[in-house]
Image (cartoon, grey):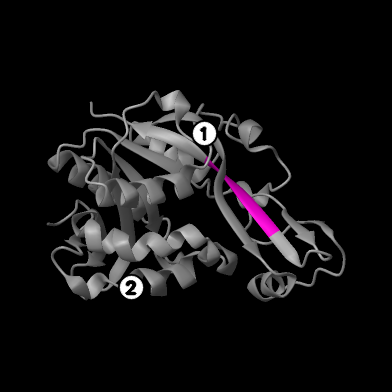
Amino acid sequence: MKTASNYIVTTVEESTDLRGQDTLMARIAWPEFMLHDPVADYFTELYDYFPQHQFALADETTGEPMCIGNSVPLAWDGDFNDLPDEGWDWALEKGIKDHQAGRSPTILCAIQVMLPPGHRSKGLSAEAVRVMKEIGQSRGLSTMIAPVRPSAKHLYPLTDAARYIEWQTDEGMPFDPWLRVHVRLGAEIIKVCPRAMRITGSVAEWEKWTDMRFPDSGTYVVPGALVPVEIDREADRGVYIEPNVWTVHTAK
């Protein structure tokens, strides 16, 4: 199908050529350390079990993917205020395990929208969220939850995430650009999920991932990280626990 922005939407169900392109795009779109969350290993099953929910927005002339969107159906009917603090990690793992256990999904969860830097600020992210919701609704999933990674939070890594999501523009919209996209598309901001991702590695791995040196144990601000990384040289371990923001899109 064609979007309003003259991009073609292609799902993995329609074209298996899209498999693997998410890995290539992720290395451009995300900081290196973000590629080492162990829960992300479930992406193979995500594509196997839910190919209809994994899609690309591609240039209608060249066929080049400009944006990739991933989501996962979940069997969950709790109160939105009780959504887990583990956010992204919880959602991806639960969707896979729900499918393996034969549980029928009741809700859709956004996993990611990826755009390389050269294709940002073109309205593609909003388009991808709309497509994601439409695919879910076409399969009977009228509500979509999303553990949103606030796109400008890395510029304010020392600011508490709960305080950050209270910041607003002069127009009364969320200060964060990615949260603004969701709110403009009808989402409600619910709360911070403070342990949405947990990434651990040795000191050497963190130095490689960040192109930094960590001579002492302590707290370090790392480019691209939403909060500081904790380095323990004695234990030879670095730990990054990322907060995201739960939002809910309900059918209007």
Q: Nearer the viewer, residue 190 or 206?
A: 206
Residue located 40% across and 72% down the image: 23
Name the residue tied to disc 2: 21
> Residue flagged by tag 1: what amino acid is it?
Pro
* Span highlighted in magenta in the image: 239-244
* Residue 174 falls within the magenta-colored stretch: no
Question: Is residue 37 among the parts visible in the rendering?
Answer: yes
Amino acid type of the residue tagged 2 in the rendering: Gln
Toward the viewer: 185 or 199?
199
Residue 163 - label: none
Magenta stretch prevailing secondary structure? strand
Calculate the distance from the C-alpha at mark 1 to the C-alpha at mark 2: 32 Å
Q: Residue at x 72, y 75 (%)?
A: 204
Give me the residue at 70% from left, 69% from top.
202
Q: Position of residue 79 (x, y in %)?
A: 39, 23
Which residue has dot 1 on it? 174
Label 1 element class:
loop
**Left or right: where does residue 89 sit relative to residue 71?**
right
Q: Could you say where residue 244 lies in the image, as x and y percent from the top left?
A: 53, 43
Quadrant in which the C terminus is drawn: top left
